[in-house]
Structures are given as structure tokens and as C-alpha cells.
């Protein structure tokens, strides 16, 4: 990496944390055209990582964004029986509610692992749809929750919501939910193997970026300046099939993101922001 690139990354990170806006990064990255979602293609994930903002996930901006989104969803829950259509990804949460309903049995508690589930926001997006079902919703994420988030979550009144700091493979989960996670995982095959150890009935990959290609594609996102992998659907689907999982559903995550695909110039075979549901058959 040249001294110029190191200096540019330092400037981006410093301004980003001081001002707390992803649009600063857009202005600094002169190569990005208006409306683009991704920047350049790279030969490897590590090459893309060299270009990213290393402080994004610890930034004040990201913390405030998490709190704002969680607060909005909780307020909507308090006013409505179901999630409102104002949420652009509402179709995703109807699907997870449906999966939980399929496993509903009054004599059994449904165990859900929300891998990379942040502050449990997907639990709050879903809970009003599954009020009469017995379930435990366990969130695993490496982020540290802020005081404001803990106050909003109020676990005393959400007794089936848990936050776990390690994965115990002696535990079994009926459903594993992974929302907008795999694009940030370099060796995602290892993470899949970890999922398989739990032998879940269903695995739901929500907001999953993939493309119709034999190989994965490495790039960086414009909005948060993070290295990501757009995964080969053929390769990914083959791994799931070899481990006893059959594709049950494949569809777009939201209309908003489908419209955004018109601005992507990386690959004409991009499936985009998808929902993939797999069912264990062996």
C-alpha cells in the first residue's frame, strides 16, 4: 500500500468518526460515480480490506444508526399488531415468522439462533407476528451493546430474547437466521460448517448478496466503505446441498434494493440482495 493510500484511509477514518456520516466517504472517493453501490473489483478479499475504513463498526455513526433503527422498530411494535409496511424489508420478516410458525408445537420450545443479530432488531421486527408461539431467540454478535440499546431492549419484558457471547455446539437450534452477514466473512465456508454442527431444520440467509457466476467477487461498498464478497450462488448452493440442505425458497429481499440494482455496474449476472431459505433433508 502506498503512502498516499495510507494517508487517504487515515483521513477518511478520522473525518468519518468526527462527523459520523457515510457521505463524507463518498465525497472523498472521487472514483465513485453518482448512484453506485460498489467501488472497484479486487483480486482477493484481503486486497479489498486494504481499501476499507477499519473503524466503521466502532464509529459513533454506526452506534447511533443502530439505536435509531431499534428505537423506530420498538415504537412501531407498541402501536401495531404487525410490522408496518414502512419497513422496506418487511417481506423478510414475514418469511421468518412463517418458518417459526411451521415448527410451532405447544409441547416444544423453538430455538432460534440469530447469528450476527446486532442488538436483536430482527427479534423486535418479528415478535408481534408470533405472539402465541413458544420460542427462544438467541442473538450472537461480536458488537458491544451501548447503554442506550440495553435500555431499549428491556430484557425483563422480553424474556425469550437472549444475548450469547459464545456458541456451544452441544446446543441445538431449529432455525439459524443470518441477516446481511456473509458478505463480510472472508472464509464463509468455515462459518457454514459451524452452522451445520447445530443441525438446524432451517437456515435462513436474509439480505444475502450473490451472483450467477462460478467465482466469488470482491469489492467494497460505497456507503460504509467496507470490503465485501458477492458470493457465487452456484458455489454456495453446492456447499449446502452436499451437507444435506435443499433450497426451499429464493427471492428478492425488498423492492427498494431491486430498484437500486439498476445502478450496479460490476456484473450483469448479479442476483442482488436476496432471501435464501434452506431445509435439512438428511
Image: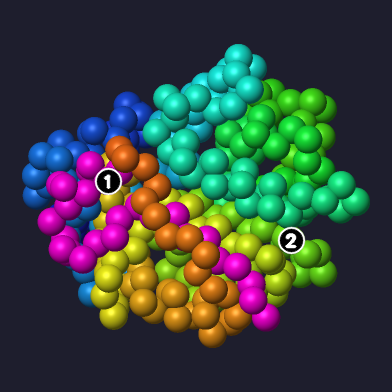
Against 220, residue 199 (above or below) is below
Q: Nearer the viewer, residue 60 or 183?
A: 183
Q: Residues within 10 Å of mark 2 (few under 14, many from 20)?
A: many
Which SS class for mark 1?
A: helix
- Which percent across, then down, holds residue 61? 41, 31
On screen, 145 above or below 45?
above
Label 1, on which residue? 258
Q: Which residue appears at 69% of the width and 23% of the height?
A: 151
- Residue 38 spot, x, y in % from top left: 22, 52
Q: Nearer the viewer, residue 16 or 234?
A: 234
Q: Which residues are magenta?
A: 257-282
Pointer 1 or 2: first along the chain: 2
Could you tell me if residue 265 is visible in this image? yes
Q: Residue 173, labelled with which disc?
A: 2
The furthest residue to the bottom: 242
Q: The N terminus lies in which quarter of the figure?
A: bottom left
Q: Quadrant of residue 59?
A: top left
Q: Cβ–Cβ below 8 Å for labels 1 and 2? A: no
Q: Can you give x and y, in whole percent of width and height, for residue 153 in the image? A: 68, 28
User: Does residue 115 appear to the left or right of 162 in the view shown?
Assistant: left
Amino acid at each position: 500500500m502506498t503512502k498516499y493510500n495510507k494517508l487517504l484511509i487515515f483521513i477518511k477514518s478520522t473525518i468519518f468518526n468526527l462527523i459520523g456520516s457515510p457521505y463524507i466517504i463518498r465525497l472523498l472517493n472521487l472514483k465513485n460515480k453518482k448512484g453506485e453501490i460498489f467501488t472497484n473489483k479486487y483480486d482477493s478479499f484481503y486486497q479489498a480490506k486494504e481499501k476499507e475504513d477499519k473503524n466503521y463498526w466502532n464509529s459513533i455513526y454506526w452506534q447511533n444508526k443502530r439505536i435509531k433503527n431499534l428505537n423506530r422498530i420498538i415504537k412501531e411494535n407498541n402501536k401495531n399488531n404487525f410490522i408496518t409496511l414502512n419497513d422496506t424489508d418487511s417481506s423478510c420478516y414475514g418469511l421468518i415468522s412463517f418458518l417459526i410458525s411451521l415448527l410451532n408445537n405447544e409441547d416444544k420450545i423453538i430455538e432460534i439462533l440469530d447469528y450476527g443479530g446486532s442488538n436483536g432488531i430482527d427479534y423486535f421486527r418479528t415478535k408481534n407476528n408470533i405472539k402465541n408461539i413458544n420460542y427462544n431467540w438467541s442473538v450472537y454478535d461480536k458488537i458491544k451493546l451501548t447503554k442506550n440499546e440495553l435500555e431499549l431492549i428491556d430484557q425483563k419484558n422480553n424474556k425469550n430474547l437472549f444475548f450469547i457471547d459464545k456458541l456451544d455446539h452441544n446446543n441445538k437450534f431449529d432455525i439459524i437466521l443470518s441477516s446481511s452477514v456473509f458478505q463480510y466473512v472472508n472464509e464463509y465456508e468455515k462459518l457454514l460448517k459451524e452452522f451445520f454442527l447445530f443441525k438446524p431444520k432451517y437456515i435462513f440467509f436474509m439480505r444475502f448478496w450473490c451472483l450467477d457466476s462460478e467465482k466469488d467477487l470482491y469489492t467494497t461498498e460505497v456507503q460504509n466503505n467496507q470490503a465485501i464478497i458477492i458470493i457465487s450462488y452456484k458455489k454456495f448452493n453446492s456447499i449446502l446441498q452436499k451437507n444435506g440442505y435443499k433450497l426451499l425458497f429464493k427471492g428478492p429481499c425488498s423492492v427498494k434494493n431491486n430498484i437500486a440494482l439498476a445502478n450496479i455496474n460490476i456484473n450483469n449476472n448479479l442476483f442482488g440482495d436476496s432471501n435464501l431459505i434452506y431445509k435439512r433433508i438428511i
